[in-house]
Image (cartoon, rainbow, N blue to C red):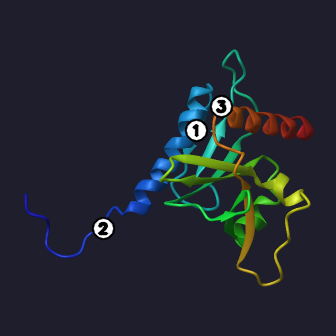
Amino acid sequence: MQPPPGPRKQRTRQHVIADQSVNHVERYVIDAGHTAQRLGADYGYDLVMQTYDPDGYTEPGLIYFQLKASEALARSGNDFAFDLDVRDYNLWKVEPFPVILVLFDAAARRAYWVHVQDYFAGGRFRRPKKGAKTVRVRVPRGQVVGRRAVAAWRRSKAGVAVRLV
């Protein structure tokens, strides 16, 4: 079959690893008995997680995810460094339910996470300067996406849901 004449849209390696990052997180969420919904338009969130109790009943609230995929993650000591768009920071700092930033290392097929509101409230975070376009976030190498991570995300959401009632 002959390709159509003229320029066309192309699926790039970055598109492939972005999809791999979402799939990587989805598998752990689904295996834990929860659901993950991909969001089409990117307004600060790529994936939303709904949790369920041991009897399969839905639990209040959601967990939001922003996923960033790379062939190799930028290291900074024992962490990975990521420059976050300040507009995402401004949104996430007022979001009551957990927002999880996930960095996916395509070469290693591993992902690392940080609960951003906890990170912003912690002592290691520097607030962005006025007029800044980005803010540096450090994601611990020890926080690997897996079964334990899903359980931690669920606990974080449950704590928020209790405070909001």
Quadrant position of the N terminus in the picture: bottom left
**Distance Cα–Cα, label 2 vs label 1:** 28 Å
Going 73% across and 51% down the picture, which residue do you hit? 114
The reply, left or right, for residue 51 in relation to residue 31 is right
3D distance between C-alphas at marks 3 and 1? 14 Å
Mark 2 neighbour class, 10 Å CA radius: few under 14, some 14 to 19, many 20 or more: few
- Horizontal side, residue 110 vs residue 154: left or right: left
Query: Judging from the image, what secondary structure is the residue with disc 1 in?
Result: strand
* Left or right: 107 in relation to 42: left
Residue 137, percent from left and from top: 74, 64
- Nearest the camera: 86 or 105? 105
Dot 3 amino acid type: Arg
Residue at x 70% of width, y 79% of height: 133
Instruction: Tell me whether circle 2 and circle 3 mark residues in contact (CB < 8 Å).
Output: no
State which tag comes first along the sequence, 3 or 1. 1
Tell me, for residue 36, which label it has, or none: 1
Q: Which residue is mark 2?
A: 9
Q: Give the label, 2 or 3, closer to the camera.
A: 3
Q: Which mark is residue 157?
A: none
Label located before the other in sequence (2 or 1): 2
Question: Is the residue marked by circle 3 packed among few (<14), some (14-19), or many (20+) residues within 10 Å?
Answer: few
| Residue marked by disc 3 | 147
Taking the spot 82% from the left edge, 34% from the top edge, the residue there is 158
Kind of element beneath mark 2: loop
Q: Residue at x 77, y 47 (%)?
A: 98
Q: Count numbered badges in the picture.
A: 3
Q: Amino acid at mark 1?
A: Ala
* Image height of 61 relative to 108, above or below: above
Q: Nearer the viewer, mark 3 or mark 1?
A: 3
Query: Viewer-proximal residue, 95 or 100?
Result: 100
| Left or right of 52 on screen, residue 97 | right
